[in-house]
Amino acid sequence: MRTFFALKTKMPYDPHVLEHMKKTATELLCDVEGDAHTQAIVLYSATGNTYGTVVKDACSREMTEEKSMLAGLRAAGDTQIRYLLCMWLDGGVDIPSLAFRRMTVELDPQNAAALLLVMTAEGTSAISVGETMK
């Protein structure tokens, strides 16, 4: 089984968008009292809008915050995601849950091509959401 840490992808991504998303995640988390299960999820839509939420308990099966964020995209008619970033409270960038990735693809099937920004041995890299679900 391959690990995302060892994953070497050559998928290009916009470093300016990455920095914007990391800044957004950091701002979302700066005043949060959380624990090891707290994370921020930031989405950058195909229209250039940024959406983010803080997930207090990433282990929760209810996924209240995630569902609410995706409902906001649906209500805005802005369902196609270009980039996805998940940052833990300690600043680590990671892959969001499989359930959340499935929900993004259910929201808009084109989201299977959205780029998930992950940390690898070589630094930040990008992989399509669909590739992570194989």
Image: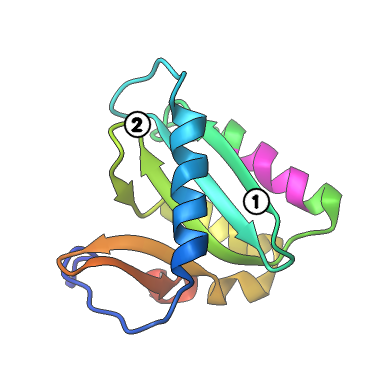
**Crowd class of label 1 (few under 14; some 14 to 19; many from 20; radius 10 Å):** some
Give the residue displayed 23% in from the left and 78% down from the top.
8
Quadrant for the C terminus in the image: bottom left
Above or below: residue 33 compared with residue 45: above
Q: Is residue 131 visible?
A: yes
Q: Earlier in the sequence, mark 2 or mark 1?
A: 1
Residue type at the position of mark 2: Leu
Outermost residue on the bottom side: it is 10
Which label is found at residue 50?
A: 1
- Coordinates of residue 111 in the picture (x, y in percent): 61, 70
- Comparing 134 with 114, the one in front is 114
In magenta, the rendered stretch is 66-73
Above or below: residue 103 compared with residue 35: below
User: What element does badge 1 sit on?
Assistant: strand
Outermost residue on the top side: it is 33
User: What element does badge 2 sit on?
Assistant: loop
Above or below: residue 6 compared with residue 118: below
Which residue lies under the disc numbered 2?
Answer: 89
Residue type at the position of mark 1: Thr
